Amino acid sequence: MIIAVDGPAASGKGELTQRLAKHFNYARLDTGKLYRAVGWRVISVGGDPSDETTATRAAKGLTANDLEAPELRSEIVAEAASKVAAIAAVRAVLVEFQRAFAANPPDGKSGAVIDGRDIGTTICPDAPCKIFLTADIEVRAERRVNQLHEQGTVAIYGRVLKDMKERDSRDTTRSVAPLEPAEDALVLDTSKMNADAVFTAALEFIASRTSD
Ligand code: DC
């Protein structure tokens, strides 16, 4: 079983995929972390995340350890991630790992919940359950500011909003695997929904997709 959950930053994917993975006892993969880890590998040594050769080399050298770096949650790394994610060769390197995870979830789990931007469209186009979360950008920027404050990071709303607009634009207009809902995805606008309401709607949708 594969549940693909896509959507822009701070649309609620993280919370939803954690709840779904727990509920069904499936393995969860946050694919944004892969791109963040590649971005961090590049900028931590002063490299340019938009440079194809540098970024592709970083993607090829990715290790499990790189996914644990605390810096991955920062806004600087998010920006670098969005830049490396626009490079087709970087995406090509990361495709196999994601598909292998979906086909053979670790720890003998019987399913996978995968959080990303292109899971329903490119990585797992045959996934039986695809959910696309979205929300107004102002709401998402506010959520991100709150998350950053919880991490103990100083964040200014206007700056976060501006950066988020730039990243949204890069993620949706890139030529390779742009952020967009799959045709058969349930699209949920979470602007006015709390996490419980999103979870309930997702469970109903999954039940409807798996009942026959
Ligand atoms: O979800 P996130 O904020 O951690 O993602 C970081 C960046 O990686 C974001 O700009 C989009 C990109 N990304 C992607 O292109 N494809 C994915 N499957 C996941 C993330």
Image (cartoon, rainbow, N blue to C red):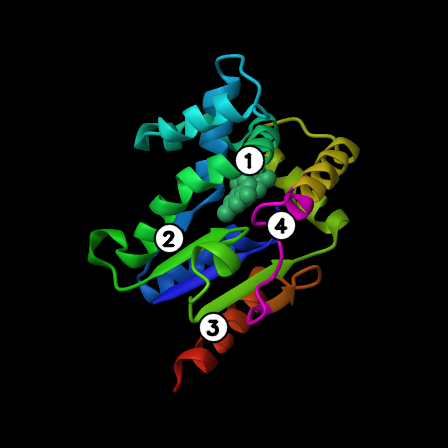
Range of residues picked out in magenta: 171-186
**Cα gap from disc 4 to disc 2, whole angstroms:** 18 Å
Q: Residue at x 40, y 58 (%)?
A: 113
Q: The C terminus is located in which quarter?
A: bottom left
- Specify which label sits upstream in the sequence, 4 or 3: 4
Q: Which residue is mark 3?
A: 203
Magenta span has 181?
Answer: yes
Q: Which-is-in-front pick, marks 4 and 3?
A: 4
The prevailing secondary structure element of the residues shown in magenta is loop
Label 4 packing within 10 angstroms: few (<14), some (14-19), many (20+):
many
Q: Quadrant of ligand 1?
A: top right
| Closer to the eye: label 3 or 1 | 1
Residue picked out by circle 1: 87
Residue 75 x, y percent position in the rendering: 61, 30
Instruction: Residue at 54% x, 12% y: name it.
Output: 46
Residue closest to the far left: 108
Q: Earlier in the sequence, mark 1 or mark 2?
A: 2
Residue on which the image places disc 2: 28
Tell whether circle 3 marks a residue whose Cβ is less than 8 angstroms from ligand 1: no
Question: Label 3: how many residues lie within 10 Å, few (<14), some (14-19) or many (20+)?
Answer: some
**Callout 3 amino acid:** Leu
Which numbered disc, 3 or 1, marks the residue that appears first in the sequence?
1
Q: Which mark is residue 8?
A: 4
Quadrant of the drawing holding the N terminus: bottom left
